[in-house]
Image: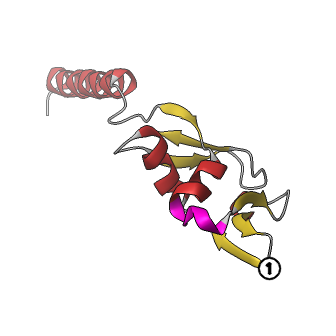
């Protein structure tokens, strides 16, 4: 193979690689979610269980984001569906996100 042919192939390969890298760096994210707001855990209890139960949103463990429960004055607790809470608060297509699994107050909703 001639040296001029090798240079041309090498140069073409470098240009193609450079264009591919530039395209990858400037391409927008396919689907970036946007935060739409926080999660109202009390509202979740009110909508996910019968109001006659009088359930209150409580955190059972201050170091566990998954410890939210709807609790009654008598030893009765139920879990909270946080995705459902987001859809209820912000409409169809909203879902939950969590910033820190050790912080119960770090839940948010996104779309």
Residue in the foreground of this view, choosing between 42 and 73:
73
Q: Is residue 101 left or right of residue 7?
A: right
- Looking at the rendering, in which quadrant would you find the C terminus? top left
Q: Where does residue 22 sit, x and y in percent of width and height?
A: 34, 21
Q: Where does residue 23 sit, x and y in percent of width and height?
A: 30, 24
What is the magenta range? Answer: 48-53
Residue in the foreground of this view, choosing between 10 and 18:
18
For the question of whether residue 49 can be seen, the reply is yes
Q: Where does residue 89 sit, x and y in percent of width and height?
A: 48, 42
Q: Is residue 16 magenta?
A: no
Q: Where does residue 27 sit, x and y in percent of width and height?
A: 32, 25
Answer above or below: position of 11 versus 82. Answer: above
Q: Is residue 14 left or right of residue 45?
A: left
Q: Residue furthest front?
A: 52
Q: Is residue 33 left or right of residue 47?
A: left
Q: Quadrant of residue 28?
A: top left
- The secondary element bearing badge 1 is classed as loop
Q: Is residue 51 magenta?
A: yes
Residue in the foreground of this view, choosing between 27 and 48:
48
Q: Residue at x 59, y 49 (%)?
A: 43
Q: Main secondary structure of the magenta part?
A: helix
For the question of whether residue 80 can be seen, the reply is no
Q: Which residue is mark 1?
A: 75
Q: Residues within 10 Å of mark 1 (few under 14, many from 20)?
A: few
Q: Residue at x 35, y 36 (%)?
A: 31
Q: Residue at x 34, y 45 (%)?
A: 92
């Amino acid at each position: 193979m001639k040296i001029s042919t090798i240079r041309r192939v090498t140069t073409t390969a470098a240009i193609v690689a450079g264009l591919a890298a530039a395209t990858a760096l400037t391409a927008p994210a396919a689907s970036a979610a946007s935060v739409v707001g926080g999660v109202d855990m009390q509202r979740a209890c009110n909508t996910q269980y019968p109001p006659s139960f009088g359930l209150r949103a409580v955190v059972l463990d201050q170091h566990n984001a998954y410890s939210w429960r709807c609790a009654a004055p008598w030893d009765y607790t139920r879990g909270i569906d946080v995705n459902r809470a987001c859809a209820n608060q912000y409409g169809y297509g909203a879902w939950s996100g969590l910033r820190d699994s050790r912080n119960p107050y770090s839940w948010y909703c996104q779309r």
